[in-house]
Amino acid sequence: MCVNRSVIYYQSIKDDAELEAALLSKAEAHPREGFWKAYGRLRLEGHHWNHKRMHRVYKKLGLSIRRKAKKRLPSRVKQPLIVPTELNDTWSIDFMEDRLETGRKVRCFNVIDDANREVLHVDIDYSLKSKRVIWVLTHLVKRRAKPKKIRMDNGPEFIAHITQEWSKAQEIDFLYIQPGKPTQNAYIERFNGSYRKGVLDAYVFENIDQLWERTNEWVEDYNHYRPHDSLNGLPPVVYAKKFLSGASPRKELSAKNKTSSLI
């Protein structure tokens, strides 16, 4: 092969143990910083390893941070906020986050009817994926009626292919607000503020069961007894019966479904 024997039998005598330990310590202390930040920190500490050697060891240890590519959103057209004159014309949906006393994160998926601001459902769990969103909306459609439109932001759960396919199958228009314009979804944002002030920021919850229980009590009061300034001082259910067409007693979605088989 015209190759010297020394090339075949050569074994490196480089000792990278110290460099490996230094890079691992930087990766542990600063997990979201990449190679050049680690290189800069080590050079400032007085180490004289050059960037080529450091990068070789960095790659060898598998410390490279996966680069996240941004997804390009289709153009979103501003949709005017029109108060519907009948129930189930337009729903608004959104997510909220909070933490339990233990520090564990919980998510809330909120659904309201724009016509009378009635809370159709608040779903709570440690993780809420696109399939869970579809499950909630499907059961609301079966128990109430199919809306013509659903307004939402551009969250990953809402722009996923599975939710897009569901909207087409159900013939429900998804109205996406423009990125960075939460005021275009003002009805649900207003509700989020009330829910956070009345429940999430008002109590410290030891577990998710306590959050479920307090949320159900608060939603019952919100829909049936709490006066709303935008509804002539009436609760949503009372307002719908008096002023909106298509008003009928609402069938409740199962308040506490913890099944994870659909997630």
Image: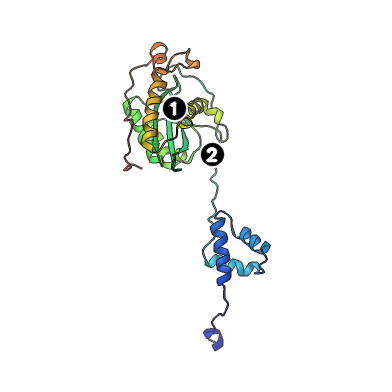
Quadrant of the snapshot with the C terminus = top left
Residue 35, image quadrant: bottom right
State the SS at label 1: strand
- Colour pattern: rainbow
Q: Do the numbered discs 2 and 1 sit on residues whose CB atoms are within 8 Å?
A: no
User: Which percent across, then down, holds residue 144?
Assistant: 34, 24
Q: Is residue 130 above or below residue 33?
A: above
Of residues 210 and 169, the one nearer the viewer is 210
Disc 1 marks a residue whose amino acid type is Lys
Residue to which mark 1 is pinned = 149
State whether residue 45 appears in this view: yes
Percent x, y of residue 97: 47, 37
| Residue 111 on image: x %, y % | 42, 29
Looking at the image, residue 141 sits to the left or right of residue 92; the answer is left
Q: Vertical placement of 88 versus 73: above or below?
A: above
Q: Position of residue 109 (x, y in %)?
A: 42, 34
Residue that badge 2 annotates: 74
Tell me if residue 262 comes above or below residue 36 in the rendering: above
